[in-house]
Image (spheres, grey):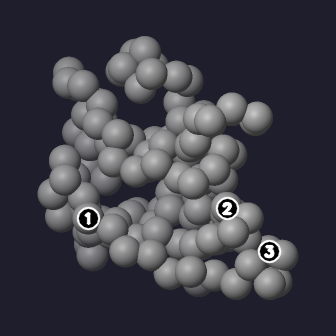
């Protein structure tokens, strides 16, 4: 898949495959510019990537963790004002719905990564 379909370079770190044909990745914003991070879904074959989420800031989207069994995608969004864990229902990867859990900005530790324990 050519990165040009995403409008800007894709992250080399934030990528998640949910099947042999469907994946998710992020593009970064720019410091001092009005561009925010974005989450995209794409097919490994032909097709056009689809933007499904805009972060409120640049360089804030972090780990992409998938739960293929539960059809969930977990994305960390470490903005200064509203740090949160965004949870996408990927039952239909072309049209995912999301909810979020806000984390505490008071700790000074916005979510950057998560793992299964």
Residue 114 seen from this side: no
> What is the C-alpha distance between the residues marked 2 and 1?
20 Å
Comparing 60 with 114, the one in front is 60
Q: Which residue is mark 3?
A: 109
Asked which secondary structure carries label 2, the reply is: loop
Q: Is residue 95 above or below residue 110?
A: above
Q: Is residue 28 above or below residue 47?
A: below
Q: Residues within 10 Å of mark 1 (few under 14, many from 20)?
A: some
CB under 8 Å between discs 3 and 1: no
Residue in the foreground of this view, choosing between 94 and 12: 94
Could you tell me which quadrant the C terminus lies in? bottom right
Q: Is 12 on the left or on the right of 19, as rendered? A: right
**Residue with the mark numbered 2:** 79
Question: On the picture, is 6 further left or further right than 69?
Answer: right
Q: Which mark is residue 42?
A: none
Q: Is residue 107 above or below residue 41?
A: below
Q: Who is closer to the viewer here, 90 or 17? A: 90
Q: Is residue 106 above or below residue 109?
A: below
Q: For the residue carrying disc 2, how many other residues have a C-alpha within 10 Å: few (<14), some (14-19), or many (20+)?
A: some
Earlier residue among tags 2 and 1: 2
Q: Position of residue 83 (x, y in %)?
A: 64, 71
Q: Which residue is mark 1?
A: 97
Residue 84 coordinates in the image, percent (x, y):
57, 73
């Amino acid at each position: 898949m050519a990165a040009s379909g995403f409008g800007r370079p894709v992250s080399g770190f934030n990528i998640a495959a949910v099947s042999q044909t469907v994946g998710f990745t992020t593009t970064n914003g720019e410091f001092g510019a009005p561009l925010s991070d974005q989450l995209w879904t794409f097919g490994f074959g032909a097709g056009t990537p689809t933007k499904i989420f805009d972060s409120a800031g640049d360089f804030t989207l972090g780990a992409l963790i998938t739960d293929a069994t539960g059809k969930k995608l977990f994305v960390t969004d470490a903005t200064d004002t509203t740090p949160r864990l965004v949870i996408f229902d990927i039952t239909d990867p072309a049209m995912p719905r999301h909810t979020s859990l806000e984390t505490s900005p008071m700790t000074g530790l916005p979510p950057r990564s998560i793992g299964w324990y």
